[in-house]
Amino acid sequence: MHITLTIDGQAVAVPAGCSVAAALAIAGDGTARRSVSGALRAPVCGMGICQECRVWVDGVRQLACQTTCRAGMRVEVTQ
């Protein structure tokens, strides 16, 4: 079963139960933000310690690796 959410305004179908970090990888290059120097950053640890996967989910800042996708959720990559 798949669900649909939006990532930066683009509809993305992902398997039900997957993390937002996995959805970022399915939707493109898997990056979640840019560092202060402009380098692209992506999830590293997969368990919330590195903080590299910070994104906005329905207007609230969350860790992509710790957030399960829901149908209709809006994800915005932090730039």
Image: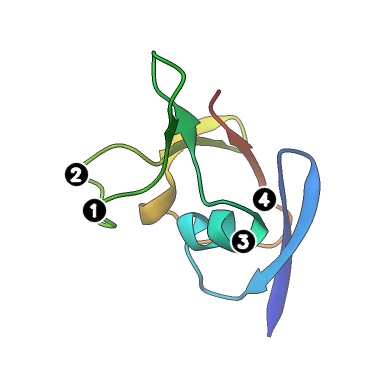
C-alpha span from label 1 to label 3 = 22 Å
C-alpha span from label 4 to label 1 = 23 Å
Q: Is residue 29 left or right of residue 72?
A: left
What residue do we see at 51% from left, 70% from top?
A: 18
Can you say which quadrant of the picture contains the C terminus? top right
Instruction: Specify the label residue 70 is tagged with.
Output: 3
User: Could you say where residue 13 lies in the image, as x and y percent from the top left?
Assistant: 73, 68
Q: Is residue 16 left or right of residue 72?
A: left
Q: Residue furthest bottom?
A: 1
What residue do we see at 44% from left, 54% from top?
A: 67
What residue do we see at 29% from left, 57% from top?
A: 46
Of pointers 1 and 3, the one earlier in the residue sequence: 1
Of pointers 4 and 1, the one earlier in the residue sequence: 1
Instruction: Residue type at mark 1: give it.
Output: Cys
Instruction: Specify the label residue 45 is tagged with.
Output: 1
C-alpha span from label 2 to label 4 = 23 Å
Residue under numbered circle 2: 49
User: Could you say where residue 53 lies in the image, as x and y percent from the top left?
Assistant: 39, 41
User: Could you say where residue 8 lies in the image, as x and y percent from the top left?
Assistant: 71, 38
Q: Name the front one of labels 1 and 3.
A: 1
Of pointers 2 and 4, the one earlier in the residue sequence: 2
Identify which residue, 37 or 68, lies in the foreground.
37
**From the viewer's perspective, is residue 47 above or below residue 74?**
below
Can you say which quadrant of the picture contains the N terminus? bottom right
Residue under numbered circle 4: 73
- The part of the image, by quadrant, that contains residue 63 is top left
Q: Name the front one of labels 2 and 4.
A: 2
Q: Are marks 4 and 3 in contact (CB under 8 Å)?
A: yes
Q: Residues within 10 Å of mark 1 (few under 14, many from 20)?
A: few
